[in-house]
Amino acid sequence: MKEYFTEILIIIAYSGRTQAAIILGAIGFVVISLVGDYYLANFQLSGQMSGLTDIIKEKFAHRYDKVACGVLFSF
């Protein structure tokens, strides 16, 4: 098990593509999370639909989280 872990670390250390993929995945995760929070911060419905504001915010926040995790793991 120790050799397997060492081999993975060596691949990450010497492979530029792997490092780029990890960095791009992390950046994409952070950016999508921040954009989602920004768009949902001032989300308000008016009139009869105002009671659904919190429910819709939760649904969209969950969707942004799923997309961010998808980007992180796909890279």
Image (cartoon, grey):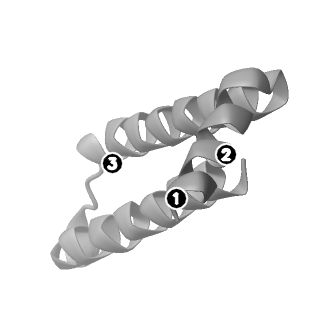
3 lies above or below 21? below
| Residue bearing the label numbered 3 | 40
Q: Residue 3 versus residue 50: which sits nearer the camera?
A: 3
| Residue bearing the label numbered 2 | 7
User: How many tags in the picture?
Assistant: 3
Q: Residue 47 versus residue 60: which sits nearer the camera?
A: 60
Q: Secondary structure at mark 3?
A: helix
Mark 1 surroundings: few (<14), some (14-19) or many (≥20) residues within 10 A = some
Q: What is the number of the mark on residue 1?
A: none
Mark 2 surroundings: few (<14), some (14-19) or many (≥20) residues within 10 A = few
Q: Name the spot of residue 42 as percent of width and height, x first.
A: 26, 41
What residue do we see at 42% from left, 65% from top?
A: 60
Q: Amino acid at mark 1?
A: Cys
> Which picture quadrant has residue 44?
bottom left
Q: Rounded to the nearest whole Å, what is the CA distance between mark 1 and mark 3?
A: 18 Å
What residue do we see at 48% from left, 67% from top?
A: 63
Q: Secondary structure at mark 1?
A: helix
Q: What is the number of the mark on residue 69?
A: 1
